[in-house]
Image: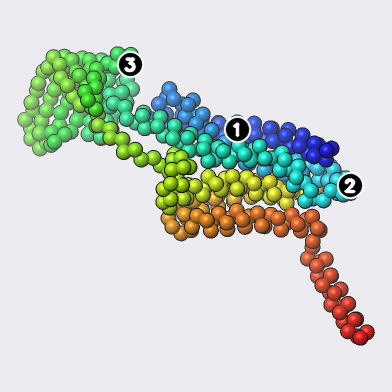
Amino acid sequence: MLFESSIRKELARSFGATLVVLMTIVITIILIRTLGQASRGSVNPQDVMMVMGYSALGRLPIILTLSLFVAMVSTLSRMYRDSEMVVWFVSGRGLAFFLVPLFRFAWPVLLVITLMSVFVWPWSNEQSQEMKDRYEQRGDLERVSPGQFQESSSGNRVFFIDRDVSQEKASSNVFIASTEKGKNSVTTARSGRIETVGTSQVLMLDNGQRLENEIGKSAIKITEFAEYGSKAGDDVLADGTLPERSKSTRDLIRTPTPANQGELAWRLGMALAAVNFVVIALALASVNPRAGRSGNLIFVLFTFVVYHNLLNLGQSWITVGVANFGPFLLALHGGALLLALTWLAKRHLNWTFRAAATRQLKRQADRRASKAAS
């Protein structure tokens, strides 16, 4: 009991501290990226916090996996450095006995990582995509910021407004320059408002003037109006298609296309990788007084980055048909687990090449001696 409780308490402290640091870094990066998207008009500035929340929630499985990996390696390395591991080894606890307390501590985190990879990841991506699509599907006049020229979604109109009255969906001093059906036109009005007619948005202009001429001709047609209606944007036809990362796991299983299988391999791979990292952490944990404390951490981060990049690379391979779903999962995650267990057994049994060679030479000498005696 003392053996397991002491390890779990230190793992909990290290895991919590690592998680807070990584979450702070990731949220800062997401904030900068989301603000950049909002400045480019891809995200509604009012929805920045929501988009940040969904993005952070979707990346939480990766953060939890890395936090668990770093916490285990740093805790075990600290025990090596302070000679606590020697005490446990002398008391009859080999290195392989640490797997039990490590998995007893890690299984709730592994369960959360699995559930979030399978269910929360697609849900958060779907919510973020819906918010971005809804913002992209707003009317052309709604895209315009007062005092700025803004191109329409179709690219054939330029809008300008002097003042925006958002509550009334109206604007003052409206300017529209358009090129349609071989004609250039410039329309100005004192005010404008948006009205929805069927599936279309219509910009109703009041007290204005319209200049129109055909391209390549000098004749200009000038028209003054008290009220004029102009289509403010293209009709939005929802095709109901979602990117693979936004589809539910059930839909991926029901429709086993290469792209869906690649996404499914990534989600399942996150859960399998988290389990493998527990074994890898125990196999890699050590201390080298000459390398310092940061040397082991750098190697841990390098291992995580390589494993995660192989997971992303396998997803692309499955999508393009280079690899198959089942063989890839078995090769990557099964191979990583086998390699980690082999390295762990080597350290647990103190295998060395010199000792193996010495034992082999001793066996050969014993055989020769027995043959000579017979």
Q: Residue at the far right: name it.
A: 373
Q: Residue at x 77, y 49 (%)?
A: 286
Residue indicated by mark 1: 23
Q: Which quarter of the rendering shows the C terminus? A: bottom right
In the drawing, does residue 311 fall left or right of residue 15?
Answer: left
Q: Residues within 10 Å of mark 1 (few under 14, many from 20)?
A: some
Report, in whole angstroms, how far the alpha carbon at label 3 lies from the one at label 2: 74 Å
Who is closer to the viewer here, 225 or 75?
A: 75
In the picture shown, does residue 202 fall above or below 294?
above
Residue indicated by mark 3: 166
Viewer can see residue 55: yes
Q: Tell whether label 1 touches label 2 (CB within 8 Å).
A: no
Residue indicated by mark 2: 91
The earlier-in-sequence mark between 1 and 3 is 1
In the picture shown, does residue 278 fall above or below 185?
below
Q: Tell whether label 3 touches label 1 (CB within 8 Å).
A: no
At mark 1, the secondary structure is: helix
In the picture shown, does residue 323 fall above or below 46?
below
- The image position of residue 73, as x and y in percent, is 72, 44
In the drawing, does residue 72 fall left or right of residue 59?
Answer: right
- Location of residue 252 by image quarter: top left
